[in-house]
Amino acid sequence: MTESASENKGTGRSTARLAAVQALYQVAATESDYSKVVRDFLAGRLGGMAINEDPDTEAETHVRLADMDQGMFSGLVGEAIARQGDIDEIINANLSDDWPIERLELIVRSILRAAIAELLGAVAAPAKVIISEYVDITHAFYSGPEPGMVNAVLDKVARILHSKDLAAS
């Protein structure tokens, strides 16, 4: 595989992760049927754009995202929706008692749901890569403590899942 093909594959996977977060947010915010949201994303009617804000002028511009890995996107959203109850329990178990999942902003919940779906095996990728990608996505939305919280939760979940995998072998 050429270097540019490899870069495009990685970019396509990163874009799929961001689109999955956006789709999960859309489903939760509007209570839309997830299969319709997925179809709209795949058809280009939703997603595919990001807002870039100039820190000096605060002017916003829309930036077209790279083509996404459509299979990965569909798999992530489908797995996150199908296992949402289990995933939400995992999130709650790894948050402090005074900060339950209901207190998390919807975008943070969507980030964690997509990431944990991936950690649970929706996509084959190393945990370090998954965590790094979703922390980067969180940085795109937040400049405060949220990226650190997402990193901490995902790191704890990955360690627990890894120890269960070792015990099973």
Image: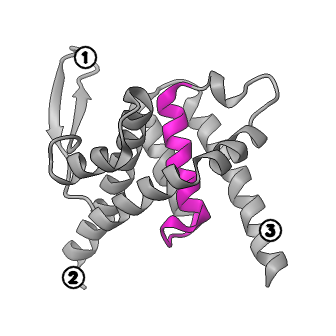
Mark 3, other Cα within 10 Å: few <14 / some 14–19 / many ≥20: few
**Magenta region, residue range:** 105-127
Q: Indicate which label's residue lies in the foreground, 2 or 1.
A: 2
- Going 15% across and 42% down the picture, which residue do you hit? 45
**Which residue in the protein does label 3 denote?**
163
Q: Label 1 belongs to which residue?
A: 56
Q: Tell me the residue at 81%/79% (across/down).
A: 168
Q: Is residue 82 left or right of residue 93?
A: left
Name the residue tied to disc 2: 2
Secondary element under disc 2, as helix, strand or loop, is loop
Residue 122 magenta-highlighted:
yes
Q: Is residue 19 above or below residue 10?
A: above
Please name the amino acid that badge 2 sits on: Thr
Location of the N terminus (image quadrant): bottom left
Q: Residue furthest top?
A: 57
Q: How many numbered marks are there?
A: 3
Along the polypeptide, which appears first: circle 2 or circle 1? 2
Does 114 lie within the magenta span?
A: yes
* N-term mark: 1 or 3: 1
Q: Is residue 90 positioned above or below 30 on the image?
A: below
On the image, the x and y values in percent for residue 155 come to 68, 52
In front: mark 2 or mark 3?
3
Give how far apart the Cα atoms at labels 2 and 3 are.
36 Å
Corner quadrant of residue 61: top left
Q: Amino acid at mark 3?
A: Ser
